[in-house]
Image: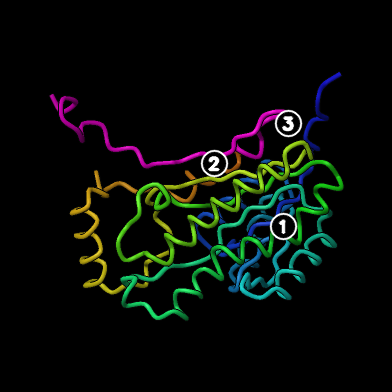
Amino acid sequence: MPRFEPHPHRRPALIAGASSGIGAATAALLAAAGHPVALGARRADRCEEIAETVRKDGGEAFAHPLDVSDSGSVARFVSAAAAALGDPEIVVFGAGDLGAERVHELDSDGFAAQLQVHLVGAHRLVSHVVPGMVARARGDIVLVSSDVVRAPRTRMGAYVAAKNGVEGMARALQMELEGTGVRASVVRPGPTMTGMGMGWDAETTGEVLQEWVRWGLARHPYFLRPEDVAAVIAAVVATPRGTHLTLVEVQPEAAVGAGGERTR
């Protein structure tokens, strides 16, 4: 007798932050693997466009407004997605944006707002979904973190604090869920070419990059693509039951010949 029943063939997935970037790429990849996907974000119109593309490609998708800073919005999203697709088997949380303020120049309301989205927002979704997963004795939670937990970056103090909180919460969750059949995992991307930070003006962007270089945080100019991170998330949730990828860090690979002896 196996220790665990295999994953169901059809695994409804909730994607928070699905209107662009990693969330949108993850929704497309999970749908291509045969899983129904519920796309949630404040830009519900963009989620609907992505859902329509998924459906045209033969997948099953549902779009619904989601503001993770609002408990009522989270509850409505989870309820509507379950009604449309069935009980969730997979939850991916990657909602949020970031500013470029120094910690001492950011007012407390702005600091708290980032914590509300990245950390408290993740908890809102977890608290609405995980009890049902525990009752069914299976499910995957994937929290998208950042390598700023391991190597903090300047101009991102609130984001750094929030992502440290996400990983701390995830570790506690892993301990509490051990033996329930529900897995909680952290995927920790390095620099990724998404919409986050794309609203910065050219002067701010230049200052930020110079500071990162000064602190040794920019080894080469290459970024991950959202699809690269989505592939890792898909691999994490597809891992056979009985195994648990608790933390996976993903970094962009430098071009061949970009370093030292390889150029000869």
Q: Identify the magenta region.
A: 235-264
Secondary element under disc 2, as helix, strand or loop, is helix
Q: Quadrant of residue 174?
A: top right
Q: CA distance from mark 1 to mark 2?
A: 19 Å
Q: Main secondary structure of the magenta part?
A: loop
| Residue 236 among those drawn in magenta | yes
Q: Residue furthest top?
A: 1
The residue carrying mark 3 is 241
Single out the mark in the foreground, 1 or 2.
2
- Judged left or right of residue 131, residue 115 is left
Amino acid identity at mark 1: Ala
Pick whichever, 66 or 160, lies toward us. 160
Q: Residue at x 62, y 66 (%)?
A: 47
Q: Quadrant of residue 45?
A: bottom right
Q: Earlier in the sequence, mark 1 or mark 2?
A: 1
The residue carrying mark 1 is 61
Q: Residue at x 70, y 29 (%)?
A: 240
Q: Which mark is residue 231?
A: 2
Secondary element under disc 1, as helix, strand or loop, is strand
Single out the mark in the foreground, 1 or 3.
3
Mark 3 crowd level (few <14, some 14–19, many ≥20, 10 Å Cα): some
